[in-house]
Image (spheres, rainbow, N blue to C red):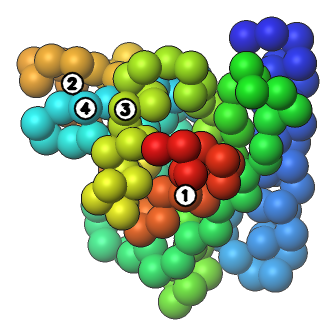
């Protein structure tokens, strides 16, 4: 990660924390993830972006979703355009359950110069759906089916929100 990418990533994490605090001030529960790794995944059982987080963060998200206490009904994608084409892309995804006033903040960093990432987004644009999978960090981007299989998935029906308009036109 370049110095510019690192500072943009740090700024995104700080913004995520600040926005989450605003949610909390308005009575919402807010979980802010700090990904250790974000990797494209294309397996038989899932495709999209794997977001590897600490075991503690994963357990929290899994418990919210698996218990059925939280059903994500809306999401916001805050995409930040890169300053140059060779910079990584960053975005903040806020998954929301309006009924329980619960939100999960998922910061993302991905590189469209990476063939696997580019291919994943091309497929997502074609299918009009992209998945963000929160998973324990050691399982993020696993390429074989015998890797750990725990994840919580969030679906987004407009992959273009994660890209530049020029990217979408070029594909």
Q: CA distance from mark 3 to mark 2?
A: 23 Å
Tell me the quadrant of the picture where the N terminus can be found.
top right
- Relative depth, front residue between 122 and 146: 122
- Is the residue under label 3 in contact with that under label 4 (CB below 8 Å)? yes
Q: Earlier in the sequence, mark 1 or mark 3?
A: 3
Q: Earlier in the sequence, mark 3 or mark 2?
A: 3
Answer left or right for 37 relative to 62: right
Q: Residues within 10 Å of mark 2 (few under 14, many from 20)?
A: few
The mark closer to the camera, 4 or 2, is 4
Residue beneath disc 1: 160
Task: Give the x, y percent position of residue 67.
Answer: 30, 66
Which secondary structure lies at badge 3?
A: helix
Q: CA distance from mark 4 to mark 2?
A: 15 Å
* Residue for point 79% across, 70% down: 24
* Residue for point 52% across, 78% down: 74
Task: Give the x, y percent position of residue 6.
Answer: 82, 19
Residue beneath disc 3: 119
Q: CA distance from mark 1 to mark 4?
A: 19 Å
Q: Earlier in the sequence, mark 4 or mark 2?
A: 4
* Residue for point 75% across, 27% down: 85
Residue 110's quadrant in the figure? top right
- Is the residue under label 3 in contact with that under label 1 (CB below 8 Å)? no
Residue beneath disc 4: 42
Answer left or right for 65 relative to 107: left
Q: Earlier in the sequence, mark 1 or mark 4?
A: 4
Q: Earlier in the sequence, mark 2 or mark 1?
A: 2
Q: Outermost residue toward the bottom?
A: 99
Residue beneath disc 2: 148
Residue 57 higher or lower than 62, as above or below: above
Task: Give the x, y percent position of residue 107.
Answer: 65, 43
Task: Give the x, y percent position of residue 48.
Answer: 36, 42
């Amino acid at each position: 990660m370049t110095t510019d990418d690192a500072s943009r990533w740090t700024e995104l994490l700080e913004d995520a924390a600040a926005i989450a605090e605003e949610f909390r001030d308005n009575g919402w529960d807010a979980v802010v993830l700090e990904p250790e790794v974000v990797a494209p995944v294309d397996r038989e059982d899932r495709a999209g972006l794997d977001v590897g987080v600490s075991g503690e963060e994963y357990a929290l998200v899994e418990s919210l979703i698996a218990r059925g206490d939280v059903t994500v009904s809306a999401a916001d994608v805050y995409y930040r355009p890169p300053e140059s084409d060779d910079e990584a892309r960053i975005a903040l995804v806020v998954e929301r359950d309006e009924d329980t006033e619960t939100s999960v903040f998922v910061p993302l960093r991905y590189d469209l110069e990476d063939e696997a990432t580019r291919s994943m987004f091309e497929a997502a644009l074609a299918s009009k759906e992209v998945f963000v999978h929160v998973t324990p960090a050691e399982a993020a981007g696993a390429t074989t089916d015998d890797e750990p299989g725990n994840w919580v998935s969030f679906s987004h029906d407009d992959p273009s929100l994660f890209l530049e308009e020029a990217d979408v036109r070029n594909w």
